[in-house]
C-alpha cells in the first residue's frame, strides 16, 4: 500500500446533480452518498455523510442553535489508497480535536464522496500502467485527463476530476495539481479548442406548460389525481420562486415555516438546511409566492388564470397530504408503499420534469431536453422581460451577483423595470396565450 499522501484542499468544489427517475416510483430513501469499498482503510469521516437528510420536526423555532449539518447519518466513505485519515494533512492532524472537526467540515459530504470516487478511478488507471497514484507527474495526470476528454466528458467534469486528484495528490513544484501552471494552461487550451456551446433558448415552452395546467388532468384540484396535484404544485413553486430543487425540498410545512397570508405565501427552509453556497446572503432565505388572480369574476379567462395561483395549489396540496404526512417536509411521497415519507431532491426534480412532459403530451408536441434546473432560467428571464428590477431577480433566485444571471441564466437581452417577481413570471407567460387551444 502506498504511503499516506499529503491531502491538499483545492479552491474548487464539486457539485453533483442526480438525474430524475420515473414519476410513478416514489423513493423514501435519501442516501445518495457513494461508498468506495467494503472495508474502511482508515477511520471514516466524523459526522453524518448523507447529502440529502430527512429533516426532523423543528423544536426551537427558526433560530437553530449549534452546528449546521445533515440531520440523519449516512454511510461512511472509505479513504482510498492510504489517504490520510479523515481527509486531513499531516500538519492538520496535529490540531486539537475541535479544530480537526471544523477542518473536516470544509467539504460537503457529497463532495467527499465524489472526490473519493474520482480518485479511485484515477488510481485504477495508474495501476493498469504500473504507476503509483501519489507519485505521478503532472504530465501523466494530464494524459489521464485527456483520456477522459476523449471519452466525452465535459470540461466541467474534467475540472472535478482534477480537483479530486489535487485533494489526494501531494502536489509538485510547490503548488497543488489543480493550480499547477501546466494544468492551468491545459484547461485554458481545452476552453479555446472545445468551447462550450449554450443553446439560445430552453428546449421547452413555459407558455405551453402553463396553458395545459389550466385544464384536465390538473384541474379541478379538489378531484384530480394526487400525483398530478403534486406535479402541478411542485412546478408552480419552482417557476414562481426560481429556487433550486434542493432548496424546495428543504421547505417545511408547519408554521412558522409555511404561512398563508391573504395576498401571498411565505415559505422558509428547515433551519438545518445548508444551500449550495453557504453565506449570510444564501442561508435561510425566505420565499414569497404571490397570489395570482385571487378573486376571479365572471370572466372565463380570469377563472382559468386563477387556476395558476400557486397559493391555491399549495393550500390544496397541504390539505390533501396532511392526513397521511409522516414528515415535516412540505413535499412528501404519494405512492402507496411510501406514502407520506419525505422525498429526495431527485424525486422532486422528476415531479417537475414529469409535469412539463405531460403538458407536452397533452398538446401532442414532442418534448425536447427537459431539466428541473431550467425553471430558474425560464423564470428569471421572463421576470426580466416583465420589468422586474435586476436586483429583485437576483434576490429572489439567491444570486449575490448580477453576473451570475447574465452569464448563466439570462435568455433575453432587453432590460425593463417594476412588478412583482412571481406574478410577473405567470403574467408574461400567459398574456398572449389562448387557453382554449
Image: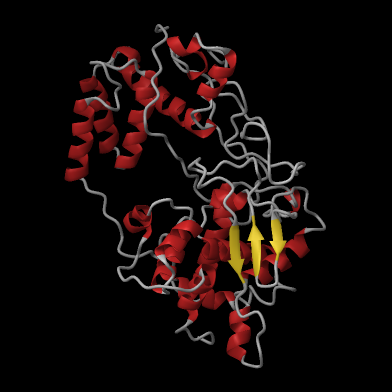
Residue extending farthest to the right is 323
Quarter-of-image position of residue 351: bottom right
**Picture colour scheme:** secondary structure
| Residue under the image location 60 percent in, 21 percent down | 46
Quarter-of-image position of residue 295: bottom right
Residue extending farthest to the bottom is 298
Question: Is 82 placed above or below 273 here?
Answer: above
| Residue under the image location 53 percent in, 73 percent down | 423
Quarter-of-image position of residue 40: top right
Nearest to the observer: residue 270 or residue 351:
270
The image shows residue 199 at horizontal and vertical percentages of 31, 60
Labels in figure, total: 0
| Residue under the image location 65 percent in, 61 percent down | 266
Question: Is 165 placed above or below 264 here?
Answer: above
Question: Is 117 placed above or below 396 here?
Answer: above
The image shows residue 317 at horizontal and vertical percentages of 71, 64
Query: Left or right: 296 with respect to 185?
Result: right
Nearest to the observer: residue 399 or residue 87:
399
User: On the rendered image, what quadrant is the N terminus found in?
Assistant: top left
Query: Left or right: 8 with respect to 355?
Result: left
The image shows residue 372 at horizontal and vertical percentages of 49, 57
Query: Left or right: 256 with respect to 282?
Result: right
Nearest to the observer: residue 266 or residue 347:
266
> Is residue 153 visible to the viewer in this orientation of the structure?
no
The image shows residue 92 at horizontal and vertical percentages of 47, 13
> Is residue 264 visible to the viewer in this orientation of the structure?
yes
Amino acid at each position: 500500500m502506498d504511503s499516506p499522501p499529503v491531502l491538499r484542499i483545492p479552491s474548487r468544489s464539486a457539485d453533483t446533480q442526480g438525474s430524475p427517475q420515473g414519476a410513478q416510483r416514489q423513493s423514501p430513501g435519501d442516501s445518495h452518498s457513494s461508498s468506495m469499498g467494503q472495508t474502511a482503510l482508515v477511520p471514516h469521516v466524523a459526522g453524518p455523510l448523507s447529502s440529502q437528510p430527512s429533516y426532523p420536526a423543528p423544536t426551537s423555532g427558526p433560530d437553530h442553535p449549534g452546528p449546521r449539518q445533515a440531520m440523519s447519518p449516512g454511510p461512511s466513505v472509505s479513504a482510498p489508497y492510504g489517504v490520510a485519515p479523515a481527509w486531513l494533512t499531516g500538519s492538520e492532524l496535529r490540531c486539537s480535536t475541535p479544530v480537526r472537526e471544523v477542518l473536516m467540515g470544509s467539504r460537503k459530504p457529497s463532495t467527499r464522496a465524489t472526490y473519493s470516487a474520482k480518485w479511485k478511478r484515477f488510481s485504477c488507471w495508474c495501476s493498469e500502467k504500473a504507476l503509483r497514484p501519489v507519485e505521478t507527474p503532472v504530465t501523466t495526470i494530464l494524459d489521464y485527463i485527456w483520456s477522459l476528454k476523449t471519452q466525452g466528458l465535459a470540461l466541467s467534469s474534467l475540472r472535478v476530476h482534477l480537483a479530486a486528484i489535487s485533494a489526494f495528490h501531494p502536489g509538485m513544484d510547490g503548488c497543488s495539481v489543480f493550480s499547477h501552471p501546466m494544468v492551468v494552461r491545459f484547461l485554458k487550451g481545452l476552453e479555446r479548442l472545445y468551447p462550450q456551446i449554450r443553446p439560445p433558448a430552453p428546449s421547452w415552452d413555459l407558455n405551453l406548460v402553463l396553458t395545459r395546467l389550466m385544464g384536465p388532468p390538473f384541474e379541478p384540484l379538489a378531484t384530480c389525481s394526487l400525483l398530478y396535484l403534486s406535479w402541478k404544485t411542485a412546478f408552480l413553486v419552482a417557476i414562481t420562486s426560481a429556487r433550486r430543487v434542493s432548496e424546495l425540498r428543504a421547505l417545511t410545512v408547519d408554521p412558522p415555516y409555511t404561512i398563508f397570508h391573504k395576498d401571498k405565501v411565505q415559505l422558509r427552509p428547515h433551519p438545518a438546511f445548508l444551500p449550495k453556497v453557504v453565506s449570510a446572503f444564501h442561508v435561510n432565505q425566505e420565499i414569497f409566492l404571490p397570489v395570482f388572480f385571487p378573486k376571479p369574476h365572471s370572466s372565463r379567462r380570469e377563472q382559468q388564470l386563477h387556476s395558476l395561483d400557486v397559493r391555491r395549489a399549495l393550500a390544496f396540496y397541504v390539505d390533501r397530504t396532511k392526513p397521511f404526512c409522516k414528515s415535516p417536509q412540505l413535499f412528501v411521497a404519494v405512492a402507496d408503499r411510501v406514502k407520506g415519507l419525505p422525498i429526495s431532491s431527485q424525486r422532486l426534480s422528476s415531479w417537475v420534469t414529469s409535469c412539463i412532459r405531460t403538458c407536452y403530451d397533452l398538446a401532442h408536441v414532442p418534448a425536447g431536453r427537459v431539466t428541473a434546473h431550467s425553471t430558474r432560467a425560464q423564470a428569471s428571464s421572463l421576470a426580466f422581460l416583465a420589468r422586474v428590477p435586476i436586483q429583485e431577480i437576483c434576490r429572489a433566485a439567491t444570486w449575490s451577483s448580477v453576473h451570475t444571471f447574465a452569464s448563466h441564466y439570462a435568455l433575453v437581452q432587453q432590460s425593463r423595470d417594476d412588478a412583482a417577481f412571481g406574478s410577473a413570471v405567470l403574467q408574461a407567460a400567459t398574456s398572449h396565450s389562448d387557453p382554449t387551444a
